[in-house]
């Protein structure tokens, strides 16, 4: 009798791996949380997590580390999404830490680096022992070193020399009180995989990811959106352009690219042809030094 082989597609295999990670954490940790900003990676994470536990609701809340300088469209999208999906949203605010004197703002540097203290406060105050993040290894070389289960000490710090082996997809989540594990279900995905999955699964994303007309400012080889958060410098003149965002974060340091791609299929074609990662092309905060991201991760960053 002939047997029929069953083989997962590339996207199916990535999804199955992420589902396994979500279920492993739910089974072995007491208080997980999913970091959720409304961006494409966190939307794919939320979509996969919902499939992992369907028809039951998510067994953990989602948390947004809000810099206070987010795009208005993304904040609206975030709130609409959690209401539609019926998940519990926790918001920890960088502004609260600035107001309390726990963080000091440097207007020239933006607020992205200040997210570290706010994230660690959110983890500590809620007693979370596992934190899902949407980081992918293809984004940046420090993230390429990251394991799926990333151990963080009692100060929330990451030590690349203390990474644990993950042979045969076996994950070690052991930790002491005060320590926690960052978990990255999308580690092995690429930007192209994300967009192919968005197209295949019809995942809704903020409108900023697709071509639209808006005023922009050219700075340091990047196009920054002219928003109320951006201080336009001397000699900088905003002008209208048709752009889209490859990644969405703090409006003061997240650039956009000129593009006519207005659908997931068109974005897939565009991403397939690019040779620069989205963080390398559009994140000013990643240009601080060659090891900028690794230094921030050692301090406790995402």
Image: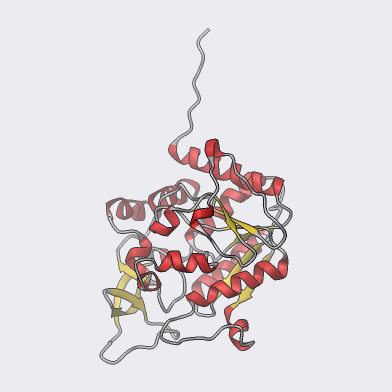
Q: Is residue 32 visible?
A: yes
Q: Which residue is at a point 63% across and 74% down the rendered structure image? A: 92
| Residue 16 x/y as whole percent | 55, 39
Q: Nearer the viewer, residue 238 or 207?
A: 238
**Against 153, is 94 above or below?**
below
How many labels, in total?
Answer: 0
Q: Is residue 28 above or below residue 159?
A: above
Q: Residue at x 58, y 79 (%)?
A: 94
Q: Nearer the viewer, residue 102 or 242?
A: 102
Q: Is residue 79 visible?
A: no
Vertically, is 111 above or below 42? below
Residue 260: image quadrant is: bottom left
Question: Would you say 234 lies left or right of 61 here?
Answer: left
Residue found at x 60% / y 74%: 118
Q: How is the image coloured?
A: secondary structure
Image coordinates for residue 217, horizontal then vertical, percent: 31, 81
The furthest residue to the top: 1
Name, please, the residue furthest toward the front: 161
Q: Position of residue 84 (x, y in %)?
A: 64, 61
Which of the pair 257/121 is nearer the observer? 121
Residue that appears at 55% across and 47% down:
164
Q: Is residue 243 above or below residue 161?
A: below
Expressed as whole percent of the image width and height from the top left, the position of residue 216 reads 33, 79
Q: Quadrant of residue 17?
A: top right
């Amino acid at each position: 009798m002939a047997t029929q082989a069953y083989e997962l597609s590339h996207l199916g295999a990535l999804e199955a791996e992420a589902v396994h990670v979500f279920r492993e954490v739910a089974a072995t940790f007491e208080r997980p949380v999913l970091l959720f900003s409304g961006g494409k990676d966190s939307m794919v994470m939320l979509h996969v997590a919902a499939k992992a536990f369907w028809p039951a609701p998510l067994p953990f809340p989602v948390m947004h580390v809000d810099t206070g300088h987010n795009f208005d469209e993304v904040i609206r999208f975030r709130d609409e999404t959690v209401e539609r999906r019926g998940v519990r949203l926790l918001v920890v605010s960088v502004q609260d830490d600035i107001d309390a004197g726990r963080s000091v703002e440097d207007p020239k540097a933006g607020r992205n680096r200040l997210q570290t203290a706010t994230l660690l406060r959110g983890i500590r105050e809620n007693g979370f022992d596992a934190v899902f993040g949407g980081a992918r290894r293809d984004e940046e070389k420090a993230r390429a070193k990251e394991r799926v289960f990333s151990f963080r000490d009692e100060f929330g710090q990451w030590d690349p020399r203390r990474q644990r082996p993950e042979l045969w997809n076996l994950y070690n989540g052991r930790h002491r009180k005060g320590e926690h594990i960052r978990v990255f279900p999308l580690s092995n995905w690429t930007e192209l995989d994300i967009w192919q999955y968005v197209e295949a699964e019809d995942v809704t994303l903020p409108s900023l990811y697709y071509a639209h007309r808006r005023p922009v400012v050219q700075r340091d080889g990047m196009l920054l959106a002219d928003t109320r958060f951006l201080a336009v410098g001397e000699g900088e003149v905003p002008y209208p352009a048709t752009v889209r965002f490859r990644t969405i974060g703090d409006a003061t340091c997240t650039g956009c690219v000129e593009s006519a791609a207005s659908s997931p299929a068109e974005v897939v074609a565009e991403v397939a042809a690019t040779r620069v990662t989205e963080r390398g092309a559009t994140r000013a905060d990643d240009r601080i030094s060659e090891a900028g991201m690794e230094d921030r991760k050692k301090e406790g960053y995402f």
